[in-house]
Amino acid sequence: MPTSLPLDVDPDTFRTMVGETGDFLAAFLRRVPDMPAWKQEGGTDILADPALRKAPSEDGRPLAELLRALERGLDLGSNTASGRFFTAIPNGGLPTVAIAELISNTVNKFSGKMAGGPSLVAIENDIIAWLIQAMGMPSDSNGILTSGGSMATLSALACARDAAAPGDLRQGVIYTTDQAHFAIAKAARLVGFPREAVRTVATDAAGRMDPARLIDTIRADRGNGLKPFCLVASAGTTNTGVVDPLPALAEIAERERLWLHIDAAYGGFFRLTARGSDKLQGIERGDSLVLDPHKGLFLPFGTGCLLMRDAAALHRTHAADEAAFFRDMKKGEADFADLSPELTRPARGLRLWLPLHLHGVGAFRRELDEKLDLARTAWKRLSDIPGISVQAPPALSIVTFRASGWPGSDDDRATETLVREVCADGRLRFSTTLVDGKVAGRLAILSHRTSAAEVDELLHRIREVAASHLS
């Protein structure tokens, strides 16, 4: 008989490997402050490195060799670990979550059913209950942790379809705006609606859904024999951070008997702050609510959340008849397999439970408050830079602005030039977007590693580039 298992390691060897990996990651974290926020140079060489790209060997390779092969390429592409990364929705990724993932992946508990890992499923339910409380939803609401906002949105619209849509999905209408995340339209198609089912409602001057225009659109659709059933509101758009008028939209949804879905993937966790709670009034009235802890709680990618006011709605849409091979596994009161598209899933709750208990909720609240402060400060200081025109004050932590009045260039081209030149060496990274059809610089502040120092550096560089084109 064999004396060892070929794919297992003894506990002492495993501890040595974890220590070696810890040293490797600690070295990475020491480099993060000086690493570029964006790097493409040298990518061809790194991606052609035979130590990195060669096929697995028959007899394996030492861990130290594999770590060395990885090291050179870790700063290639988008460095979301950098506090100088202001593109998309920045995410530094809390290092302490790696501890939770190490535990979760080592014990490898199956969390699709309560019986598979009772303690880890229990703490995931506790985290969901905390999220429900934090968002102000009724205590008997329910929820599920997902791989991200897109999967949470897919489940939300599937539940809305089953609860409120007409039998003929070609007659159903979903209302949103041109500022909504594209995950909404994508999810609608995936759950069976034609493209034309998603109706774009006009926005006001700030980019928020216009309640009066919404009512007009609903009435027009009903007059044409269609069946309005779902309203999607944004609690912080990804593009500019604006918050739709949630209380007014909730009133319309209730009066018109529409399912109210609120996309709070980016903005929802600002509700942990006093200012955010004020701006996000009405978020608690959603029938479904999407959050992304890998945005507002600074967690690594792959952590989304769906909260559902009707606790049974998730079960009605996702539960299926038990498979024969599960007949000996007792059905639990919280089987996540009955609440989401997934049967096999990791114990996701641990990656929220550990950092929230380790750091305390107050640490997250202070970080979010700082991001609101930094965005407001950046907006004010940009307005003082010659050749820069700021747009609306930030609703949350996204700032948009334009280059303006540059000799020999229209403002669209000037803005593109500004962003390109500021980001040319890769040390800083932010992006352009479109606001009212015009090119705008977009500065998104939501990394736990972004402080006043990183914002100061970016603003100083913007001022330098603008001055060079005005002289």
Image (tube, rainbow, N blue to C red):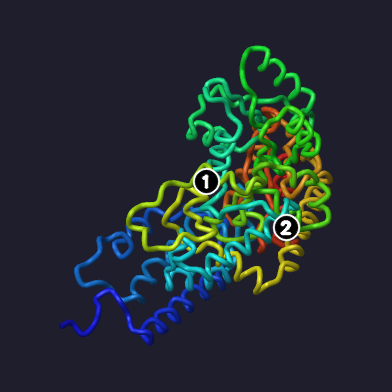
In the image, residue 216 sits, relative to residue 123, either above or below, namely above
Q: Residue at x 28, y 74 (%)?
A: 7
Q: Count the marks: how many?
A: 2
- Which quarter shows the C terminus? top right
Mark 2 lies on residue: 133
Query: Is residue 87 shown to the viewer in this render?
Result: no
Q: Residue at x 52, y 75 (%)?
A: 26
Quadrant of the image occupied by residue 84: bottom right
Q: Label 2 to label 1, Cα distance in Å?
A: 22 Å
Residue nearest the observer in this picture, 22 or 391 = 22
Residue 39 at x, y percent in the picture:
51, 55
Quadrant of the image occupied by residue 241: top right
Left/right of residue 233 with respect to residue 341 in the rendered view: right
Residue 165 at x, y percent in the picture:
58, 29
Circle 2: residue type: Gln
| Mark 2 neighbour density, 10 Å: few (under 14) some (14–19) many (20 or more) | some
Left/right of residue 336 with respect to residue 447 in the rendered view: left
Left/right of residue 371 with respect to residue 331 in the rendered view: right
Indicate which disc, 2 or 1, sits on the residue closer to the N terminus: 2
Circle 1: residue type: Met
In the image, residue 390 sits, relative to residue 107, either above or below, namely above
Residue nearest the observer in this picture, 106 or 34 = 106
Residue 405 at x, y percent in the picture:
76, 33
In the image, residue 346 sits, relative to residue 440, either above or below, namely below
Mark 1 lies on residue: 151
Residue nearest the observer in this picture, 43 or 131 = 131
